[in-house]
Amino acid sequence: MYIKTKKYKLTFGNYIRFALWEMLKQQWYVSAGLLTFATIICYFFRWKWGLLSFFSQTIYVVFLITQLYATVHLSEEGKVLFGKLYYLINNQIIQVHITPQKGFPIPWNHIKKVDIGKDYFILYLSPIQFIYLPHFIFNGEYEISFMKILLKRKKLIL
């Protein structure tokens, strides 16, 4: 049994939103450290220095967004993920297809983490490399439930 999805094109906005959120979740200590530093500076010194610390945190987030934007627009490897793709998913491998002749396999052991939202699955290969599978690309509720079963079997969700 395998799942064959409809063709789907990941938008740049969705990519940057999910990748930025994942990077901030993994690097929470940077934001927490800057916020703590800003609070201490505001309390013991002048508020201008604390404001500067808050500004540096904003610059850090802008830097992350710039990195993601450059990954999308400047690398040839990144452009492949933003074409119309369809997926063949079974219990051994995930095949990502550009055309019926062109595609590449992704073994299940490369999937590090899975997020399940109200209407999507995100299979993370790394913080900035992921497979976004909205529910509307599946051919029915049966395939969505089969995908959940596959993820449970692979111990990627509880």
Image (cartoon, grey):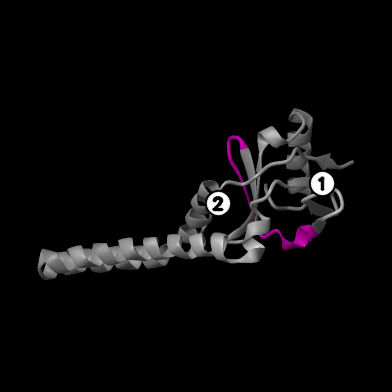
Residue type, label 2: Tyr
Q: Position of residue 41 (x, y in %)?
A: 18, 69
Residue drawn 70% across and 52% down? Answer: 156
Mark 2, residues whose alpha carbon is within 10 Å: few (<14), some, or many (≥20)? Answer: many
Residue drawn 54% across and 50% down? Answer: 12
Q: Position of residue 142 (x, y in %)?
A: 78, 30
Q: Which residue is mark 2?
A: 15
Residue 53, above or below 9: below
Work out which quarter of the rendered image holds the N terminus and state it: top right
Magenta span includes 111: yes
Residue type, label 1: Leu
Residue 139, above or below 102: above
Residue drawn 74% across and 29% down? Answer: 141
| Quarter-of-image position of residue 140 | top right
Residue 71, above or below 136: below
| Quarter-of-image position of residue 92 | bottom right
On the picture, is 150 further left or further right than 28? right
Where does the magenta region start and end? Answer: 105-119
Q: Position of residue 124 (x, y in %)?
A: 64, 56
Q: Which residue is mark 1?
A: 88
Magenta span includes 5: no
Query: Which residue appears farthest toward the right when viewing the image?
Result: 1
Q: Look at the numbered disc 1 and give the secondary structure of its residue.
A: strand
